[in-house]
Image (tube, rainbow, N blue to C red):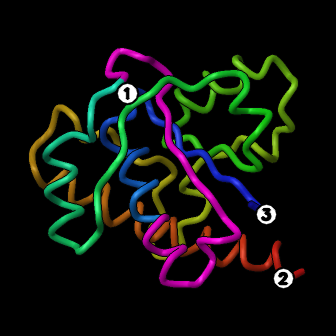
Amino acid sequence: MDYRVLFVCMGNICRSPAAECVFRKRLKNEGLDARVDCDSAGTIAYHSGEPPDARMSDELTRRGIPVSGRARGVSPDDLATFDLVLAMDRENLAHLRRLAGGDAPAENVRLFCEFCRENNAEEVPDPYYGGRSGFSEVADLIEDGCDGLIDEIRRKLDG
């Protein structure tokens, strides 16, 4: 693989697996799936081994996005092996930077919403304790950010 991206949220059952699934579909659609890989993880390992949240899965399936994966915790090795680590919010970004202990370049550990083009959100809100509309809002942000991320990675690979 030429480039590897890791999406990170707290439990790895809503936001980060959604980003992984959306991004995988976008990579395939753009013909980049042989060059770019992705994964997702959580800053807590409480849900390790669990599939994505059913409400998030339903929202993605409704949008034609295949859902797969199992939750896992992020590790210090992830920070060394992925070219880009994207946190869904500032709390998880801070956790990743503490985990890196200064070893991961700051430009490689960033907020996911930096790649959004249509939405002005700074963070992807956690929909876990909210209603169905929260999962739709998250999916909108993730699709927007993944489109911007594809453009950025294509420039890196072609540049």
Question: Distance between the Cα atoms at labels 1 and 3?
Answer: 28 Å
Q: Which residue is mark 1?
A: 11
Task: Give yes or no for residue 36 being in the magenta stretch.
Answer: yes
Mark 2 and mark 3 lie on one chain; the one further toward the N terminus is: 3
Q: Quadrant of the N terminus?
A: bottom right
Dot 2: element: helix
Proximity of marks 2 and 3: CB atoms separated by less than 8 Å: no
In the image, is residue 46 part of the stretch drawn in magenta? yes
User: Please, is residue 6 above or below residue 58 in the view?
Assistant: above
The range drawn in magenta is 24-48
- What residue is pinned by disc 2? 158
Q: Is residue 110 left or right of residue 108?
A: left
Residue 156 relative to residue 135: left or right: right
Task: Assign a secondary structure to mark 1.
Answer: loop
Residue 2 circle label: 3
Residue 26 image offset from top left, x and y in percent? 48, 75
| Residue type highlighted by circle 2 | Asp
135 is higher (above) or lower (below) than 81 = below
Residue type at tag 1: Gly
